[in-house]
Image (spheres, grey):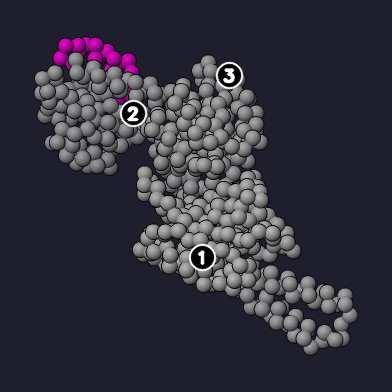
Amino acid sequence: MGNEIKILVLEDDQGDIDLIEYKLKKINSAIHIFNARVKKEYIELLAGELPDIVLSDYSLSDMDGEEALSILRKRDKNIPFILISAVIGEEKAVQMMRKGANDYIMKDHLDKLIPTIEREIKEYEYRKQAEKEHNELIESQKELFESEHKYRTLADTGRALIRQDDIDGNTNYVNEVWLMFTGRKFEQEIGAGWIENVHPGDIEKYLEPCASAWEKRLPFTLEYRLKRYDGVYRWFLDEGTPRYNTDGEFLGYIGHCLDITERKEAEKRLELKQMELERSNNDLEQFAYTVSHDLQEPVRMVSGFTDMLKKKCSDNFDEETKTYINFAADGAKRMHDLIQGLLTYSRVSTKANPFELTDLRGPLDTALRNLSLVIKESSAEIIIGELPKVFADRSQISSVFLNLINNAIKFRKQDEKIKIEISANEIKDKNLIEIAVRDNGIGIDKKHFENIFLIFHRLHSQDKYSGTGIGLSVCKKIIERHGGDIRVESEINKGSTFYFRL
């Protein structure tokens, strides 16, 4: 790597910042680390001298990893962007890489950070060099009729494979890099000879869009396999650009080809991982559903016979025995609640309804009717703003509202009237609707913002606040099924706001 590596760390947890910096210092090179905690700082740092690489948490206080990636790509399309997260999940990571992230690392596997950074910076330097060469070649075509020798010298000393076609579509030039790659002579490549190098399965895929673009004199980008001198096929990205002289006369095309085999192999690995993940998730959901369903009857028997003991034999039991029976009854009830929670979680995928245009006020009103007794007993004030229509599963969105409102009532301050606000905001540049459920309850410590969406994760003991720890994980799964995300902003004793996007 170069003399100094400039690394921008987008992270708002000081403990994680210190840990990442400790790992980075193990690289035997000079490192200069910038840290941004919020969106404003991030944008200001990118406005100055650009970093060599960006390391970003996925969940931040005022934006997520997707927005951070979008901001970086508007500034520079090549700077490596690596996600570092504790709970992002394989599916979300795959989505982020398809949107332009270079890699992701789980926070409990930071030992992979150093080799990942070294690899991405090398690839970034290669991309910068290739882009520079490409731009120089495109600029040189304007002067092609004046300086053909200069142009070909530049092409022969670059890393890209260059092919030039005349106005009839016949290749009249390939650079030395091309000939070194194919191991063939110049005479074998001109005309249509170079097509002999293209994988038979890719020829039609190449010729049809190429002919269409040629007819309209439009640039084109294609991916196909070329045979190397040793018979091995490598994947290439071919960027074809029409050539004109200074009088605007069409001269043909120039093809700038970059080896993308490693990227294609990585995409294939990700695709296989996603397929394995989907199969695994389906198996787990079916397992959870089956086990939960089969456990209901034994639990009902335990609960039923325990109640019979309490009713028929209570007068014959001493206090210690009565305590044991009450423990058994409470345990059976908690087990019943957990089973129902697991069934609800598994049914997000297995018993889902198709999406339809839904006025969000409808599922919200359904949730409020189901919570009417709790709302009345707690004297909670519910303030509802204007809500839009979205394509959604009405029943599942109602479950999200029910869980969030019920939690707002459960985790309330004892000395303050409960106030819950539901509002919506359109995010036009992303074509999303963001719904906010805001309360004035006890709040949540920042360190729990990601963990609270994990299944069975609880922040409080059972005797203080009842529950199964499944509700928020169900909300997360529902929102992700809708192609959105859910997050929380909160401060201790200052309430919480849950945001979910559809």
Q: Give percent across and percent down for residue 477.
A: 51, 57
Left of 134 or right of it: where is 121?
right
Mark 1 or mark 3, which is nearer to you? 1
On the image, numbered disc 2 is attached to which residue? 258
Q: Residue furthest bottom?
A: 312
The magenta span reads 144-161
Q: Give percent across and percent down for residue 298.
A: 67, 77
The label number, if any, that marks residue 29 in the structure image? 3
Which one is nearer the viewer's eye here, 265 or 445? 445
If you read the primary sequence from the N terminus, does the residue marked by circle 2 or circle 3 appear first? 3
Above or below: residue 318 compared with residue 53: below
Exactly how many numbered labels are in the figure? 3
- Identify the residue shown where x is 35% and y is 34%: 235
Q: Quadrant of residue 455?
A: bottom right
Left of 217 or right of it: where is 488?
right
Left of 483 or right of it: where is 136?
left
Q: Secondary structure at mark 1?
A: helix
Q: Are marks 1 and 3 in contact (CB under 8 Å)?
A: no
Q: CA distance from mark 2 to mark 3?
A: 29 Å
Q: Is residue 385 visible?
A: yes
Which one is nearer the viewer's eye here, 74 or 341? 74
